[in-house]
Amino acid sequence: MATKWDELEARLGITFRNASLLRQAFTHSSYRNEHRGDVEDNERLEFLGDAVLELLVSEFLFRAYPRFPEGELTRMRAAIVCEPSLVRFATALGLDQYIRLGRGEEMSGGRRRPSLLADVYEALIGAIFLDQGLEAAREFLQRMMFPALQREQAPILDDYKTMLQEHVQKVGLGPLTYRITDERGPAHHREFVAQVWIGGQAYGEGSGRSKKEAEQHAAREALMKLTALPS
């Protein structure tokens, strides 16, 4: 008969080699305090998972947005690796159902406490890393986290073309056009290069996995030249 831990592994798409790590990731200190024996809470796993999560989110942003400067990547990472964001992902996976809490913590609504849910998500990443390594943690995030981030970050790119169009119209710099100047790489991993021209002069260049993304990166470079947009 399947246990709740089997159910959780099926939900996560991971079979732990060391099942005790999975249980530890979901064990709050209040539960440990009420149970004797070798029960470990998730605080150390949370510490480790925080570092692993920051590394893998940094890598994701670095690869997904090759033209973005360090300052902007840092701001994006901070918005992802923060309590509200982690709570959202933990809730989407239904992780609250599996947390082991002490009686007092349970009665006071700890299962829905944002800080506790965020800690469990980080502890889970730490447990996956310890059990199966960095690649397994990366693969988990690629399935459960990064697709949503890509959908949510898309409007950020759209804003640059809109911002540039508005600025060009306001200042009266002339007609604005985009040109695809190059296509690189195999068909399954194509990279496009775009230039943005304003009033007959090239103002910015950008690359991306699609023509739209390349144009938006070019628009950002043009904005950096024309406005006080930070680099």
Image (cartoon, rainbow, N blue to C red):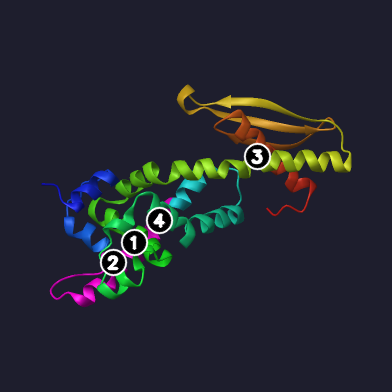
- 17 sits to left or right of 63: left
Amino acid type, residue under disc 4 in the picture: Leu
Residue at numbered disc 2: 42
Residue at numbered disc 1: 120
The disc, 3 or 2, on the residue closer to the chain's N-terminal end is 2
Cβ atoms under marks 1 and 2 closer than 8 Å: yes
- 226 sits to left or right of 180: right
Amino acid type, residue under disc 2 in the picture: Asn
**Disc 2 packing (10 Å; few <14; some 14–19; many ≥20):** many
The disc, 3 or 1, on the residue closer to the chain's N-terminal end is 1
- Calculate the distance from the C-alpha at mark 3 to the C-alpha at mark 4: 27 Å
Dominant secondary-structure state across the stretch colored magenta:
helix
* Range of residues picked out in magenta: 27-56
Residue 51: give x, y in percent of width and height. 39, 61
Marks 2 and 4: which is nearer the front? 2
The disc, 1 or 2, on the residue closer to the chain's N-terminal end is 2
The disc, 3 or 4, on the residue closer to the chain's N-terminal end is 4
Amino acid type, residue under disc 3 in the picture: Asp
Kindly identify the residue that appears in the image at 21 percent across and 46 percent down: 15
- Calculate the distance from the C-alpha at mark 4 to the C-alpha at mark 1: 12 Å
Image position of 61 with respect to 130: above or below: above
- Calculate the distance from the C-alpha at mark 1 to the C-alpha at mark 2: 7 Å
Residue 82 seen by the camera: no
Residue at numbered disc 3: 158
Cβ atoms under marks 3 and 4 closer than 8 Å: no
* Total labels drawn: 4
Residue 56 seen by the camera: yes
